[in-house]
Amino acid sequence: MSAVPAPRTERPGRGCGPAEGLRTHAAELLRHAERLRAGAAALDWKGPQAEAFRWRVEALADRCATAAAGLARSAGQLDAAVRPR
């Protein structure tokens, strides 16, 4: 029996480091935003409550997209910090 642990396997979508993990999360958030917008647009619901609901969903989708942009920006900063000069 060996005391050496088995090598870690990377989880799918995690890439090789923190920057790639941030990019993966950013892409997921963008997909969530798209699904939210598509779902709200597909609703067959009319009236002021429906419009208020759609507005809230759009605001949430915007927040997802903003967070995704921040994560992508952070990934770029991580890449720049680890590049040899």
Image: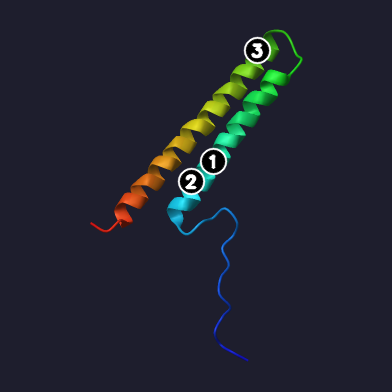
Tell me whether the residue at label 3 lies in contact with that at label 1, contact meaning CB atoms closer than 8 angstroms. Answer: no
Disc ID at residue 27: 1
- Name the spot of residue 24 as percent of width and height, x first: 53, 47
Q: Residue furthest right?
A: 44
Q: Earlier in the sequence, mark 3 or mark 2?
A: 2
Tell me whether the residue at label 2 lies in contact with that at label 1, contact meaning CB atoms closer than 8 angstroms. Answer: yes
Q: Is residue 16 above or below residue 37?
A: below
Residue ID at (45%, 55%): 18
Mark 3 or 1, which is nearer the eye?
1
Figure quadrant of the N terminus: bottom right
Q: Is residue 74 above or below residue 33?
A: below
Q: CA distance from mark 3 to mark 2?
A: 33 Å
Q: Is residue 60 above or below residue 25?
A: above
Identity of the amino acid at label 2? Answer: Arg
Count of marks, rendered view: 3
- Name the spot of residue 59 as percent of width and height, x first: 55, 23
Q: CA distance from mark 2 to mark 1?
A: 6 Å
Figure quadrant of the C terminus: bottom left
Residue ID at (67%, 21%): 40
Nearest the camera: 15 or 46?
A: 15
Give the residue at mark 2.
23
Identity of the amino acid at label 3? Answer: Glu
Identity of the amino acid at label 1? Answer: Ala
- 83 left or right of 65 in image: left
Residue ID at (55%, 75%): 7
* Crowd tier of the residue under label 3, counting other residues whose Cα lies within 10 Å: few below 14, some 14–19, many 20 or above: few
Element on which disc 2 rests = helix
Disc ID at residue 69: none
Tell me whether the residue at label 3 lies in contact with that at label 2, contact meaning CB atoms closer than 8 angstroms. Answer: no
Give the residue at mark 3.
51
- Name the spot of residue 62 as percent of width and height, x first: 52, 26
